[in-house]
Image (cartoon, grey):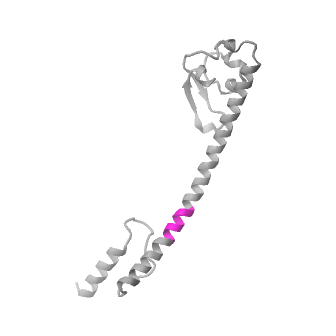
């Protein structure tokens, strides 16, 4: 191995980013002074960081949209439950079937009309906002 190839090997190995894949510096840095190497590396990493920021910003917008959709569904659910409770002559005697939004989410084998809204037994529910959310166990009293 010659001195020039040794220098080239050391220069490129010190310059290569730690990640594997398509990250390759645009131009070889061999033969440049340290200040020029630094400036080229700095420019490369600044451009790469800017690309990552754009990708992350797009992902954040998607997450924020999903969160807002879920928050809106939660507000609607809360408002519907509150109006059903306020409209009932005796809220202590409400069944799950009396509250339409809870009835729509009901996924248990027991009839919703026979289960009180203040019942503490875990029952199965399914999400009506996103079909992929699946189902979960919770007592009706916690849903009210």
* Residue 138: quadrant of the picture: top right
* Residue 126: quadrant of the picture: top right
Q: Does the magenta stretch include residue 5?
A: no
Q: Is residue 48 magenta?
A: yes
* Residue 5: quadrant of the picture: bottom left
The C terminus: image quadrant: top right
Front-most of residues 130 and 142 = 142
Residue at image location 44% in from the left, 75% down from the top: 42
Front-most of residues 23 and 47 = 47
Label tally = 0
As drawn, 97 above or below 77: above
Q: Give the range drawn in magenta.
A: 47-54
Residue 91: % across, % down: 70, 15
- Left or right of 105? Residue 49 is left
Residue at image location 36% in from the left, 86% down from the top: 33
As drawn, 40 above or below 84: below
Residue 25: % across, % down: 43, 76
Residue 116: % across, % down: 64, 14
Residue at image location 65% in from the left, 27% down from the top: 105
Principal SS element in the magenta part? helix
Residue at image location 68% in from the left, 39% down from the top: 72
The N terminus: image quadrant: bottom left
């Amino acid at each position: 191995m010659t001195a020039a190839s040794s220098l080239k090997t050391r220069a490129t190995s010190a310059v290569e980013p730690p990640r594997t894949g398509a990250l390759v510096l645009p131009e070889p840095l061999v033969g440049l002074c340290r200040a020029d190497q630094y400036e080229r590396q700095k420019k490369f990493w600044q451009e790469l960081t800017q690309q990552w920021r754009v990708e992350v910003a797009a992902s954040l917008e998607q997450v924020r949209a999903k969160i807002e959709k879920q928050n809106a569904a939660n507000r609607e659910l809360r408002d519907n439950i509150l109006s059903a409770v306020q409209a009932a002559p005796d809220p202590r005697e409400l069944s799950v079937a009396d509250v339409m939004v809870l009835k729509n989410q009901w996924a248990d084998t027991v009839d919703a009309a026979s289960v009180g809204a203040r019942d503490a037994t875990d029952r199965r529910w399914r999400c009506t906002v996103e079909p992929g959310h699946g189902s979960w166990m919770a007592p009706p009293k916690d849903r009210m």
